[in-house]
Image (cartoon, rainbow, N blue to C red):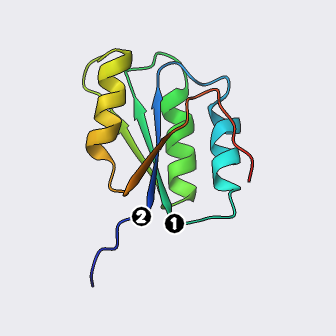
Amino acid sequence: MTHNPPTISICIPTYNGEKYLSETLTSIISQTYNNYEILIIDDQSTDNTWKIAQQFSSQNNRIKIYKNKKNLGLVENWNRCIELAEGEWIKFVFQDDTIKP
């Protein structure tokens, strides 16, 4: 079986994003275009961000979650998202963003 990478990698670098992360993910999953992956890169959050990411990931195989071994900070966490992305295009969606279908 061959691996077909997604066209778009939706990157969500996150840190303590529990307040809006569910709403953000729901807005992404509601898209009419579906050849994408969602990468959530948690930068050592101290709230329930990781738990929310795990819940969504368990329900949708397009969602890939990663937790940094140490806090990388804002820019390095963005770079980590790019390194892990498999898509031809990258779309950053931040933990408090929503997008319309």
Q: Which residue is mark 1?
A: 35
Q: Amino acid at mark 2?
A: Pro
Query: How many numbered discs?
Result: 2
Residue assigned mark 2: 6
Q: Position of residue 42 (x, y in %)?
A: 41, 29
| Depth order, front residue of 13/92 | 92
Residue 3 placement: quadrant: bottom left
| Residue 46 image point, x, y percent | 47, 15
User: Split into 4 quadrants, where in the image is the N terminus?
Assistant: bottom left
Residue 24: quarter of image: top right
Kindly state the secondary structure of the residue where label 2 is placed. Answer: loop
Residue type at tag 1: Asn
Position of residue 42 in the picture relative to residue 55 (left or right):
left
Could you tell me if the residues under marks 1 and 2 are in contact, i.e. CB atoms within 8 Å?
Answer: yes
Out of 46 and 35, give the one closest to the viewer.
Answer: 35
The answer to which of marks 1 and 2 sits earlier in the sequence is: 2
Residue at image position (57%, 57%) is 59
Q: Residue at x 34, y 73 (%)?
A: 4
User: Residue 43: which numbered mark, if any?
Assistant: none
> Which quadrant would the C terminus be assigned to in this image?
bottom right
x and y percentages locating residue 27 in the rendered image: 70, 46
Helix, strand or loop under label 1: loop
Q: Residues within 10 Å of mark 1 (few under 14, many from 20)?
A: few
